[in-house]
Image (cartoon, rainbow, N blue to C red):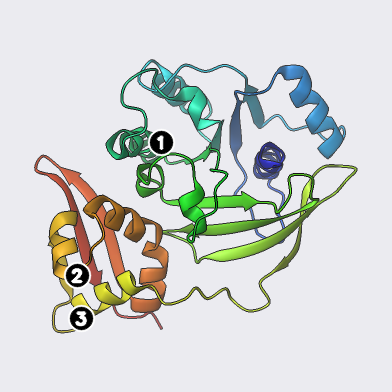
Amino acid sequence: MGKSFLMAQLAYHVSMGLPLWGYPVHKGTVLYLALEDDHRRLQGRLYRMFGMDGTNDLLFAIYAKQLGLGLEEQLKKFVRQHPDTKLIIIDTLQKVREVGGDKYSYANDYEVVGKLKRLADDCGICLLLVHHTRKQQADDKFDMISGTNGLLGAADGAFLLQKEKRTDGSAILDVAGRDQQDQRMYLTKDRERLVWELERLETEPWVEPPDPVLEAVAALVTADRPAWGGTATELAAALQTDMKPNALAMRLNVRAGRLAAEYHIRYENSRSHAGRSITLTLEPPQA
């Protein structure tokens, strides 16, 4: 699909402080765990993409320990040794997952990404996980992410790279998440350098069809009742929806940015000794 080329491109631009597709970049050290590659393949790929213009702030590893078996300590040590680290890319997530256990339950998927998110938050970095998609199509494109909804439910956001055909030189990159507006980018690949170039954004801001779940939340959290808190199960009952609580929490997690932008409602999902809780707060629109 070209996802590893996209990751190498992103890593290089961050390490060099070079704008990517017109977007400004926060320069910093980048660690790229290319766990499905070898050094020779990486060297050939980077030379073809960027020539001899190397960077001392982009570091690679082709082996890493697994989550729960030393990976967290490895990454924390790296950040201590490189305090200007801005980005760590793990390519792919499957290579660092624990062996055994109930791999594909919602709870397990949520916990895997949750551990990595806590590490990223503690270290003050962006942690970008590369993962595969399913072959079958879905009404919501982000439902094509392989595994259960727990993976996306714990993450702050997602990029989804898709081609109509594997041999196509063009692709669509969809962006969704808590802290950025949903976007759709049309990319083309430079056949010589193998880098992705931005052909265009949607000519008009990409407006998704009305989301009945978000509309129900907006009806629940109003000026008369500007805050709501409780469990996902309690929220499902309050919204009178047939969605399962886990699926509802995942949907709000992914659509939190849209909920804030369109309805001015802040969504928070936190953990305490009593379990996970959801908080919805109405905020006045900024001038």
Quarter of the image where the N terminus is located: top right
**From the viewer's perspective, is the residue at label 3 or at label 1 nearer?**
3
* Residue 123 to residue 216: above or below: above
Q: Which residue position is annotated with label 3?
A: 222
Residue lying at 69% horizontally and 52% vertically, measured from the top left: 163
Give yes or no for contact between labels 3 and 1 (Cβ–Cβ under 8 Å): no
User: At which x and y percent is residue 151?
Assistant: 40, 42
- Please say whether residue 267 is visible from this viewpoint: yes
Q: Which residue is mark 1?
A: 123
Which callout, 1 or 2, points at the residue further toward the start of the chain? 1
Q: The residue tagged with tag 3: helix, strand or loop? A: loop
In the picture, measured across the screen, residue 65 lies left or right of residue 130, that is: left
Q: Are marks 3 and 2 in contact (CB under 8 Å)?
A: no
Q: Which residue is mark 2?
A: 239
Marks 3 and 2, the one that precedes in the sequence: 3
Relative depth, front residue between 201 and 169: 169
Q: For the residue marked with disc 3, what is the amino acid?
A: Thr
